[in-house]
Amino acid sequence: MSQPAKIEILLDDSFAFEYDLYRNDEPHTTAPDTSTIDIRDPSGTKIVDGSSLTKENGPEGKSNRYSFQLTAVLNDMLGEDFSAFYKIDWSGDDPLPVRHTVLFDVVKTLLGQTVTERDLLEISPQLDDLRRLDEHEGGVITASSTTIVDASLSRLPDDWFTGGRVWLIAGLGDGQTRIISNFVRSTGTVTVDPAWTTTPDSTSRYLVARSWDAAIDTAFERIKSRLRRRGWRPALVINASELHYAHVLLSVSGAYEIAANAAGEPAGANQGPLRSIAEDYEKKFDEEFRALKLSYDVDEDLVPEGRVELASVRMARR
């Protein structure tokens, strides 16, 4: 998969820029005449000027991957809104030329997710039941000690249910529930962990529901946005553990919001109980986030200067 439109990379570290190219869901078979990349700093100055991309097979051979390795020597300046511009050309009009831009920030510390669904359930066990508000019911076609298969699930993408839960609700094995460790779209196969105590068969019916990973991911993006508004993000010095509890609270709020939507609860003055719980956890998050003491190291002397306002500095070090 190609990288998203905005990423963060670590100062003084090498980084691989990657672009996966498809044509009608298949790799391009014709080698391009030219494939290059330009990289500019926030002022528009070129750090990399027309360097060649390396072509290789993408994941599972489903694409051609074009990549460029940015060296640590060139990655020597903190800042926001650097840009990497891919240019891939063929002779003639087919295939069409590719132009693709990725924006990136160069930062002192990368933020990693530490929150899992287990963290949400420890704070609010009710979420384990609420996931069933957005569920799919069906009949087992075939099964093994660790799977159930139903071709009707093939309309959904790979990993749609991974991390979620499956319940057997009728037939052989009725009453069992398991965590879903994998979902394969092409065959409609749900893999479970641990193995079934009683292996289901074609008499069995099931319910499957997704995990709360979407709420966790959305909360993480919101926190990153809040950090950018609070101070100069590139110079922020922080450990992911410092954000853990705030991330959990905001994820729980988001999970209840998703559940409220699935239940058809109204919003606004007449909001239902699930939205009220979401609102309460949002307030708890706000309190936790405001209490964070953030440190910044703009001059890179390894001594944090404390809070750095957005307007105080735009770039440091070249």
Image (cartoon, grey):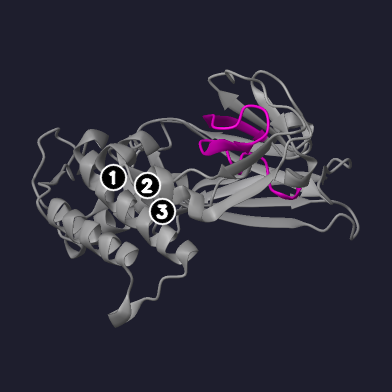
- Disc 3 designates what residue? 218
The residue mark sitting in front, 3 or 1, is 1
Label 1 SS: loop
Q: CA distance from mark 3 to mark 1?
A: 18 Å
Whether residue 304 is in magenta: the answer is no
Q: Is residue 12 above or below residue 224?
A: above
According to the picture, the residue beneath numbered tag 1 turns out to be: 124
Callouts 1 and 2 close, C-beta under 8 Å: yes
Could you tell me the amino acid type at mark 1? Ser
User: Which is nearer the eye, 301 or 131?
Assistant: 131
**Residue depicted at 31% across the width and 80% down the height:** 270
Instruction: Give the x, y percent position of residue 4.
Output: 54, 50
Left or right of 79 on screen, residue 50: right
Residue 127 tag number? 2
Q: Residue at x 9, y 46 (%)?
A: 293
Mark 3: which amino acid? Thr
Is residue 178 covered in magenta?
Answer: yes
Q: Nearer the viewer, mark 3 or mark 2?
A: 2
What amino acid type is highlighted by mark number 2?
Leu
Residue 238, compared with residue 291, is above or below; it is above
Magenta stretch in the rendered image: 155-183
Instruction: Tell me which label, 3 or 1, sits earlier in the chain.
Output: 1
